Amino acid sequence: MKSLYRQLSSIKLTIVLTYLIVSVTVTGSFALLSNKEDFEAIDESLLIDWVWATPLSSAWWIILLVLLVFIFSLNTIVCTFDRLSSLFKVWSKGRKAENDEEETLVTQEISRGKGVRIRTLLPYIAHAGFLIALAAHLTGSIWGFRGDDFAAAQGDEVEIKELAGFSVKVGDLDMVVGKRGYPETMWGDVSLLGGGKEIKRQRVEINSPLIYKDIAVYIKNVQSVPKGIVLKKSDKEGEGTFLLAQGESVHLGSGELRLVGGRMDSRYGAMELIFIEKGKIVEKRWISPYNQRFKLIKFRDIHLSAEDIKSAPVGSFSVNRDPGARILFLGLFIFAASLVAHLFFRRSK
């Protein structure tokens, strides 16, 4: 046990692990470039789920890297404990350091009997911040989730399948396309509902999600999707114009004939019209306002012409949960603040 403690508290082990972590990361980067397909989903799922679903031939370096970081964390914990225990032993006895190694652990103020100063503890506070950040990542990987993308139009409410009782309701959506034809900005008004009540509402944009506690709602894309087709009907009863949406049905004439909006083809701007009479499909025809060949349809004594395609913006969203997010920010803040303070104290000597 003592031998294991000596090994884990060794600075040499820290150096060796650092070189190994860097080497594995570099090697893995080349492996990633040569097999991009297996790594496409790594940002869309938890690391544990990705490792289980990925062949070992691709995931080996990720597994090895996690193992090395785990040992590095143990090394950091044991080294910090070993150095702090030595430091406070010297301070509590009010004596100077007895050897060079101990001297490196204690500032001149402590060796002179002036007590423990904050700048003496700053490196170990940085270690604590690093360990807190690692613990946060572990917490998020075990108890968090990354939800599947879902599409929603204005007014839609979508349940979050991973969180019972929670749902997302979508308001206005918009996307601004630049001169080169690429999206410049996209946004959507989103409400997070819990138990049927609105918990939080926010306009979400790329890299600006709605965040409530450990839940985050992201917008991925906004695109214009055909909603329906404007048809002009002419028969013995006269003329009229109406909008036919997908899945919607209208009566034609005074009998039992109904017209149902079928599939939409976004590429060609066309809709499949389904004629139903007495509960049975009697005919299917495609119609489009952009193709003269399919612009007009005659069915019995009814003439239909396609006037326009009506579109509506539809957003692509995802919901993630990371219970370690706040812990992560705390750890990073402690780590960064201790490093800045350490540099300040070094200059003020």
Image: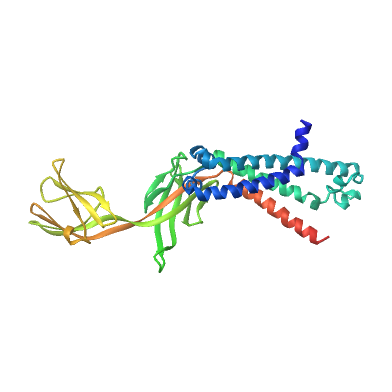
> So how many labels did they put on this image?
0
Quick one: quadrant of the C terminus? bottom right
**What is the x, y in percent for residue 282?**
13, 44
The residue lying toward the viewer, choosing from 324 and 134, is 134
Indicate whether 40 appears above or below 185.
above
Which colour style is shown?
rainbow
Quarter where residue 134 is shown: top right
Expressed as whole percent of the image width and height from the top left, the position of residue 253 reads 11, 51
Q: Residue at x 59, y 48 (%)?
A: 27
Place residue 90 in its image quadrant: top right
- Is residue 33 left or right of 277 when viewed as pictured? right
Residue that lies at the very extreme toward the bottom in this rendered image: 179
> Where residue 35 sits: x, y (%)?
49, 47
Drawn side of residue 312 relative to residue 320, left or right: left
Image quadrant holding the N terminus, namely top right
Please state if 71 lies on the left or on the right of 99 as rendered.
left
Q: Residue at x 40, y 67 (%)?
A: 180
Q: Nearer the viewer, residue 65 or 343?
A: 65
The answer to whether any part of residue 198 appears in the image is no
Residue located farthest toward the top when viewing the structure as drawn: 1
x then y, percent, for residue 152: 38, 50
